[in-house]
Amino acid sequence: MSAPAKPLPQMTPLERPYWEYTRRHELRLQKCGACGALRFPASAVCPECFSDTAEWARVSGRGRVLSWVVFHRSYFPAFEADVPYNVVMIALDEGPVVISTIVGIANEGIRKGLRVEATFEDVTPEISIPRFRPVEE
Amino acid sequence: MAVTVERSIADKTCIVGVGETEYARHGGIADKSEFRLCLEAILKAAADAGIRPDEIDGFASFGYERPEPVLIQAALGIPEMRFSNMVWGAGGGGCAAAVMNAAIAVHAGLCRYACVYRSLCQGQYERYGHYRPRPRGGPHMAPFGLMSPAQMVALTTRRHMHLYGTTTEQFGIVAVTLRAHAQRNPRAVMRGKPLTLVEHARARMIADPFRLYDCCLETDGACAVIVTTPERARDLRIRPVRILAAAQASNPGWGLGPMGSHNMPIEDYASVNSRVLAGHLFAMAGLGPADIDVAQIYDAFTGIVVMALEDFGFCGRGEGGPFVAEGRLAWPDGGLPVNTAGGLLSEAYLHGLNLVIEGVRQMRGTSTAQVADARTCLVTSGGASGHKSALILGH
């Protein structure tokens, strides 16, 4: 019996477009059709103006590390081989905060304020997950 | 005179009975079902109050409690069950809110004796420290391996370290202090296992910056508390503990906070979502942080104790680490003894209801780490969750 695979994003009608764009290696967030505010994660109504119209607007994919941790214990078999692995909070230049993983440098190189940009890992033919890698200022 | 929103149920109700089963590490109680433990705690609370168990006619719980009040009603032969209520939310944030709901119910005359209860057999069901798939937050968390409460709260705690220079040694002081309190408490799971700062610093890393002893216990056991009106309490043999204030709140935009997709406003990120709550709680009591003699602070992880001290105004933003390092949380001389039974870190993890019971003991003068002349006790509920709540108990 093989170990369970890593969890994949759950597809809800609200979330599906986000993951359809990441599959195309594009980071897009909901932008209110009325007031233009960006929101993440997806929600049915704009919390600023209550409009239920929104488009999926492409964002730069660039941001900075707000906080990070390195996990030394796995709580799911599929992550055991990855320990120690990092999880970071990234404030996108456009405002919203996303959870992700820093790739391309050792965990020891992660620091607050690190400049990063999105890169995409194709984990299945249908799903690509946004990761982030350091970039020049 | 009209009751103001601020004062509302201030000092209108009281706690007259508390009951606890034995506490054990997850899996430590295998011969009794969770439901049986639940009933045992309720029977003990009724006995403590000096009422018959079938006089309980209201129930309030939180945190996805499994035994439903109608089942308890049937099991205890309760003729009329008139209030049944549960607060949303994981992370223990509904605990004091369940006490608040019981207080509202008895104050409004919906029922006479409302029982707040929580039974939790993490050995028989699921361990809270482990991955439990959740519909919300999941799409942006689990795929990255962000799966356990320790990991989720490590992120906000790390941010606090970035912003204010808070250190892992300061977290160690929280763990060591509470463990010392537990050494006096015969119910504590960690009694007989004192902890040093060196042991804390050498323990295995769980989710950096949290090592093993920064993380709370996973427990089997049950707790219950009986709430009624001062008028009824006069007919009981036990001295009531006054509920000076009870409040529930969440900061704007917090959502599920670190238990969700971490999109709370950045200015609140390194906090425990209790700023708004603290304002309403102290306003209801007509008291301020300086009036609190002893506190039971929700300590699922050491880092959230530091942040809660700031949210509740015991020190300024960013000053929680130095406040802890000065020994302020220590019984008996710290100034603000915290979690005098050992807390969730060292007594037991009953989702915070054991903190309410220790608050009652402090106000009765029966704690194993009794604060001399304590007149007020703050009890907070929830560390990282969306729903937050708190009580101020009075002598």
Image: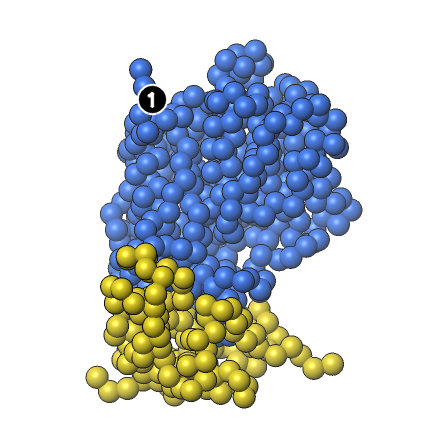
Which chain appears blue?
B
Determine the image quadrant of residue B384: bottom left
User: How far across and down, in percent of the image, does residue B52 sit?
Assistant: 68, 20
User: How far across and down, in percent of the image, does residue B353 sit?
Assistant: 54, 39
User: Residue B384, can we see it?
Assistant: no
Q: Amino acid at mark 1?
A: Val
Determine the image quadrant of residue B57: top right
**Is B379 situated left or right of B45 in this image?**
left
Residue placed most toward the observer, B384 or A18: A18
How many numbered marks have been drawn onto this rendered protein structure? Answer: 1
Q: Residue at x 71, y 41 (%)?
A: B35
User: How far across and down, in percent of the image, does residue B88 sit?
Assistant: 51, 46
Q: Residue at x 40, y 53 (%)?
A: B304
Which chain appears yellow?
A
User: How far across and down, in percent of the image, does residue B7 sit?
Assistant: 33, 26
Q: Residue at x 50, y 49 (%)?
A: B89
User: Residue B124, can we see it?
Assistant: yes
Which subunit holds the residue at mark 1? Answer: B
Which of the image's four quarters has the N terminus of chain A?
bottom right
**Is B269 situated left or right of B188 in this image?**
left
Q: Residue at x 41, y 81 (%)?
A: A21
**Residue lying farthest right?**
B31
**Residue lying farthest left?**
A137
Q: Residues within 10 Å of mark 1 (few under 14, many from 20)?
A: few
Which residue is label 1 attached to? Answer: B3
Compared to A103, does B354 lie above or below?
A: above
